[in-house]
Image (cartoon, helix red, strand yellow):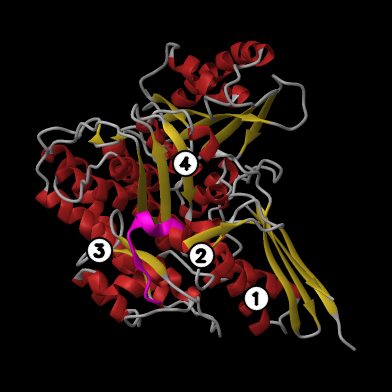
Amino acid sequence: MNIPRNVVVIGIGNQLRGDDGAGLEAARRVRDCELSTSITVHLHEGDAVGLLSLWDKADAALLIDAVRSGAPPGTIHRLDASHAPLPSPVRQASSHTLGIAEAIELARALGTLPPTIRVYGIEGGRFEAGAELTIRIASALDTLVRELRVEALRLSAA
Amino acid sequence: MSTSRVILTEALARVEGEGGMHVEIEGHEVRDVKVRIYEPPRFFEALLRGRAFTEAPDITSRICGICPIAYQMSAVRAMEDACGVTIDSGPIRDLRRLIYCGEWIESLGLHVYLLHAPDFLGYPGFVEMAREHPDAARHGLELKKTGNTIVTALGGREIHPVNIRVGGFSRVPTRAELRRKLYEPLARAREHAVATVRWTSEFTIPDLDWEPAEFVALAEPDRYPIDVGRIVSDQGLDIAPAEFNAHVVEEQVPHSNALHARIRERGSYLTGPLARYNTSSDCLWPLARSTAREAGLGRLCSNPFQSVIVRAVELVQACDEALSIIDGYEPPDRPAVEIQPRRAVGHGATEAPRGMLYHRYGIDDDGIILDARIVPPTSQNLRSIEEDLRAVVARNITLPDEALRNRCEQAIRNHDPCISCATHFLELTVDRR
């Protein structure tokens, strides 16, 4: 029997800014599913540099974050950063800290990037401080959470 | 025939907040230099009015995700001053200094490695630098993480900690807890910090024919300034924080949503690592002092491009002090001193990693905040940053636009500006005519 591979599922976002909390909510729901012990779920708010220690030594990482690209709210974008950087538009509008794309490239430069790394972007509708998740996001999460659980189990058994 | 040019950076990276730089050059003369701060003001001082005096540390910590401890510490000092309480010694002071050392290690490590070193080594950013200097990048990340670990251990979480309150802490750690969580990472961080001083001392430091008019920092007998002190300068200023308003004025300028501060009698001044070093280098502990000397720093240091080395020296000092505090720590009987409000005005000044942060509050007998004034380090430094930039452009005026833009950005980052704090980010334009 194969040794299970370590998989981390990381929800990223800001709980207090409407749909920016979608990645955190997705991770929370994955955590509540029946999972194998080799799957770890993290909720990450704040500086993306902290992601490096969350996926350190993992065989696969699934990241979930809210995005804003102009697509209809609730659209799921699936990006694979295992062998190449995320496309350049996927950049965080911040200056003092790194965004997710930079954190992935930093880990690649340091040789600590998991062999498999996928980013699930949930198109958000509103990001105002104090807002709730919008309805369309909440229903899109149902589908995404099922997909994440299946993918995490598949990767851990591979 | 004279040529004119404008050099413009729309969004300056590796600074905190939103702003721009605009430089106009005519022939070989600098016509105009502006650090344009367009990030909107956030009116924190107004929203503090009507809140309880106990809420100031938690509300003001939200001004900055990099230096929340500085805001919390200046707020608690000011409120305790208003209520007639002084906590200048004992375990609560030690724990305050320890968590502040954590913020220094996190923020100075972040600035030296992730924001500033790429300028000196010729990389567009930290990721590109990390590909060719992986060991240095690991040291930087580990320093930053150690700082965050200290803040989390004492503050409850790494950003906007929740455990600091007027009078002390909501909960204090046991001696064993501090040693278990912090000692090993800090001992390693101290080694990395010493290596950082040596590494930065090998950087090529650009010459500059300018130095700040006045260096202003806190000072305390026999201690490097962090959390407590009088406000002093190399030009003879020596005042209590309560006298700050009598000596410093803030002015609105058309191109900036951040106010510009100046010393009433003289003009521009600079706070931050160079100011602290120039007024208190004698108070550095032996390890920090000897690494500074090995790095070629004298007792005084006025070239802002050397601030990267001074920050590294301060990393050594902060790690050394943090370890010493843990060694000598005995928990206080109670986590906080109970404080009764009274109608009064209180002042607090502490040293954020990028410079001095001043708070003043008026409160009533019920402890309700009547008015608030917050003067962050970047507002105090902006006038000097523009003067510095003018000198950098003048000295490098023959450089092609791209090289000049890079040098200007590096010069701005010498001061680690936090525009979000000052308005409560940066574009750069160079205009040659």
Where disc 1 sits, the SS reads helix
Q: In the picture, which quadrant includes the N terminus of chain B?
A: bottom right
Residue on which disc 4 sits: B372
Disc 4 marks a residue whose amino acid type is: Ala
Residue on which disc 2 sits: B415
Residue at 44% x, 79% y is B302
Where disc 2 sits, the SS reads loop
Image label count? 4
Which disc is residue B347 wearing?
none
Subunit of mark 2? B
- Queried whether the magenta region covers residue B267, the answer comes back as no
Q: Residues within 10 Å of mark 4 (few under 14, many from 20)?
A: some
Q: Is residue B93 positioned above or below B279 on the image?
A: above
Residue B253 picture quarter? bottom right
Answer with mark 1 or mark 3, whichever residue precedes in sequence: 3
Q: Residues within 10 Å of mark 2 (few under 14, many from 20)?
A: many
* Label 3 and label 2 in one chain: yes
Q: CA–CA distance between discs 4 and 2?
A: 26 Å
* Label 4 and label 2 in one chain: yes
Q: Residues within 10 Å of mark 1 (few under 14, many from 20)?
A: many
Subunit of mark 1? B
Residue on which disc 3 sits: B220
The magenta span reads B235-245
Q: CA–CA distance between discs 4 and 1?
A: 34 Å
Report the side of A145 relative to A5 (left or right): right
Residue on which disc 1 sits: B390
